[in-house]
């Protein structure tokens, strides 16, 4: 039998710091959909694992930066905001930056210094089928995004992802560790007990999760006339693609701290879809999410209580959970070496 991760990994502040640096600070992450960025010029701010980020469109180019002014660390765009603009301006003291990150103006600053040395801190950006990925690694050349998409590219090849347009964003804040929620997504074992509406529409006996590369694809045979037919896939470390009928959602599982996370849904539909139909689809998604939130928060309370330490996973029903926990262990195996920020602090104290 496969042993689970220890309960302490879901509540310990040091563990959260390790995961933030070694998982979210090094791997490709979905940050947004292309259709959320104003065109032809504009910017959008998103938060990922505590990092405030800027996605900037300048004609046909999409760039990424930390949403941190080099003056006194204020944001240039409020979190979740998207705005058309030809330049970026700090919300605090008015410093201005070009869309390529160069500092162009310091309002009433009165001190001469080289603006070329004070541009915004860049991040790596890549786009795949309308989804904007970021990588926060210090490396000049992180592993290619294509390598991270193994297992998802072929499974999603027939889906009309590029034709979708963002309609609405919904956020759900949970008193649960991000891993608790991810593990819930990666198995259908709980559906019969937690999702009565979904249970009536699918064949649970034939429900499987196929793990390929760093992706997990749900194979869900549905009964005749089911409205829940679709495609559900998860990609390491924290994003799911839920495609159903004529719509889809990008579901980001964003850690907020030890024992806390936020689920961010970006709902997308083809152009011209009636608003009422889109809202009905979102309402169905919200009902299932509410059921998942209830059980994940209850599980987290028990993980925090100190009674449960480790459990066992079903090889048949929880192979996706087992793969995820294996990848978490692997990503953290390099934490014997301190990250650069920690090393700088240690050197300064010496």
Image (cartoon, helix red, strand yellow):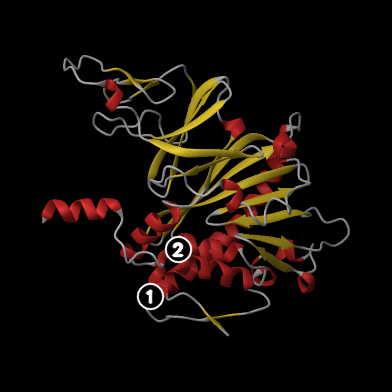
Quadrant in the picture for the C terminus: bottom left
Question: Quadrant location of residue 185?
Answer: bottom right
Q: Residue at x 43, y 76 (%)?
A: 6
Position in image of residue 343 (x %, y %): 23, 55
> Disc 2 marks which residue?
331
Determine the residue positioned at 19% across, 52% down.
345
- Viewed as shown, does residue 295 lie left or right of 319? left
Q: Secondary structure at mark 2?
A: helix
Could you say where residue 93 lies in the image, as x and y percent from the top left?
26, 22
Real-space CA distance between mark 2 and mark 1, rounded to the nearest whole angstrom: 27 Å
For the question of whether residue 37 can be seen, the reply is yes
Q: Quadrant of residue 199?
A: bottom right
Element on which disc 1 rests: helix
Whether residue 82 is visible here, answered yes or no, is no
In the displayed structure image, the side of residue 251 where residue 337 appears, left or right: left
User: Nearest the camera: 270 or 333?
Assistant: 333
> Where 195 falls versus 40 (above or below)?
below
Q: Which mark is residue 148?
A: none
* Residue at 32 percent of width and 67 percent of height: 336
What residue is disc 1 on? 305
Q: Nearer the viewer, residue 225 or 23?
A: 23
> Relative to residue 213, is residue 278 depicted above or below?
above
Q: Residue furthest right?
A: 224
């Amino acid at each position: 039998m496969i042993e689970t991760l220890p309960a302490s990994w879901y509540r310990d502040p040091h563990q959260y710091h390790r995961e933030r640096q070694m998982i979210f600070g090094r791997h490709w992450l979905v940050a947004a959909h292309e259709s959320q960025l104003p065109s032809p010029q504009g910017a959008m701010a998103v938060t990922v694992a505590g990092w405030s980020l800027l996605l900037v469109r300048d004609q046909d180019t999409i760039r990424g930066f930390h949403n941190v002014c080099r003056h006194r660390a204020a944001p240039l765009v409020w979190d979740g905001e998207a705005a058309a603009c030809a330049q970026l301006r700090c919300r605090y003291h008015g410093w201005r930056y070009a869309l390529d990150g160069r500092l162009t103006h310091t309002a009433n600053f009165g001190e001469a210094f080289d603006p070329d040395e004070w541009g915004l801190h860049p991040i790596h950006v890549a786009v795949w089928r309308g989804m904007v990925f970021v990588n926060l690694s210090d490396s000049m050349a992180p592993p290619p995004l294509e390598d991270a998409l193994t297992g998802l590219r072929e499974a999603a090849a027939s889906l009309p992802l590029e034709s979708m347009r963002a309609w609405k964003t919904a956020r759900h804040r949970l008193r649960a560790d991000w891993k608790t929620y991810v593990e819930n997504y990666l198995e259908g074992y709980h559906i019969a007990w937690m999702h009565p509406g979904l249970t009536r529409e699918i064949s649970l006996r034939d429900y499987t999760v196929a793990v390929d590369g760093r992706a997990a694809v749900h194979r869900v045979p549905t009964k005749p006339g089911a409205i829940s037919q679709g495609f559900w896939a998860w990609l390491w470390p924290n994003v799911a693609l839920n495609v159903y009928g004529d719509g889809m959602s990008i579901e980001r599982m964003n850690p907020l701290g030890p024992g806390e996370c936020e689920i961010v849904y970006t709902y997308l539909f083809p152009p011209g879809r009636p608003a009422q139909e889109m809202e009905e689809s979102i309402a169905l998604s919200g009902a299932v999410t509410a059921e998942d939130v209830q059980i994940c928060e209850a599980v987290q309370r028990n993980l925090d209580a100190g009674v449960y330490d480790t459990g066992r996973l079903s090889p048949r029903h929880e192979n996706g959970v087992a793969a995820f926990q294996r990848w978490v262990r692997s990503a953290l195996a390099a934490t014997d070496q301190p990250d650069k920020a920690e090393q700088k602090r240690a050197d300064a104290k010496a």
